[in-house]
Image (cartoon, rainbow, N blue to C red):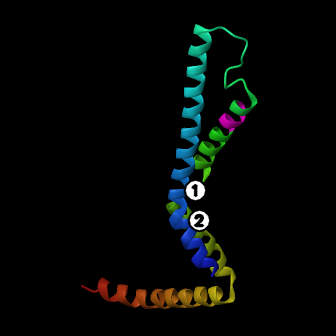
Amino acid sequence: MEFAIFIYLAATANKIIGILALVGIMILVVILLISGVASIDNISQPTREKYPLESRRGQIATMIGVILILLAIILPTERTLYMMAAGYLDQKVPQSSIGENIVKLINQKLDSYLVKEPSSSGKGSNK
């Protein structure tokens, strides 16, 4: 079950990254548009009101937008997730009892190839 969940999350990783980046960019664009409109309004009618970026809500929205974009950059893609899983399995399989048996079988097979090799090279030297 854990492996199935991993495959599902790996398949949706690129979509999650895209959504985070899109929402973050949209928040920043809206804040910049609101700030631009407010600055134009303050030029035509000078008042003591704060710009949207100077208000607490504007600062929080800007921070949320930047955090979402940074998360989109930091999160691994589908390919990276599969590479991480392969590295983990490559490390864990030899440590298990089945992995040790597989390594022993592979070593025996390689040893048998090495034993056969000198006899075949001896035939090749007689021309």
Disc 2: which residue:
84
Query: The C terminus is located in which quarter?
Result: bottom left
Q: Position of residue 87 (x, y in %)?
A: 59, 68
- The answer to which quarter of the image holds residue 96 is bottom right
Residue drawn 56% across the image and 14% down it: 40
Q: Position of residue 54 (x, y in %)?
A: 71, 23
Element carrying mark 2: helix
Indicate whether residue 51 is drawn in magenta. no
Asked if residue 77 can be seen in this view, the reply is no
Q: Report the number of numbered marks.
A: 2
Query: The N terminus is located in which quarter?
Result: bottom right
Residue drawn 59% across the image and 38% down it: 27
Please state which of the two labelled residues, at mark 1 or mark 2, is closer to the viewer.
1
Assess disc 1: are there few (<14), some (14-19) or many (≥20) residues with their C-alpha within 10 Å of its C-alpha.
Answer: some
How far apart, in angstroms, are the residues tagged by discs 1 and 2?
A: 10 Å
Disc 1: which residue:
76
Residue drawn 71% across the image and 31% down it: 59
- For this orientation, the residue located farthest to the front is 45
Q: Position of residue 52 (x, y in %)?
A: 67, 25
Mark 1–mark 2 CB contact (< 8 Å): yes
- The answer to which quarter of the image holds residue 84 is bottom right
Segment tinted magenta in the rendering: 59-63
Mark 1 or mark 2: name the one nearer the start of the chain: 1
Assess disc 2: are there few (<14), some (14-19) or many (≥20) residues with their C-alpha within 10 Å of its C-alpha.
Answer: few
Front one among 75 and 40: 40
48 sits to left or right of 11: right
- For this orientation, the residue located farthest to the left is 127
Q: Is residue 29 above or below residue 126?
A: above
Front one among 92 and 82: 82
Mark 2 belongs to which amino acid?
Answer: Met
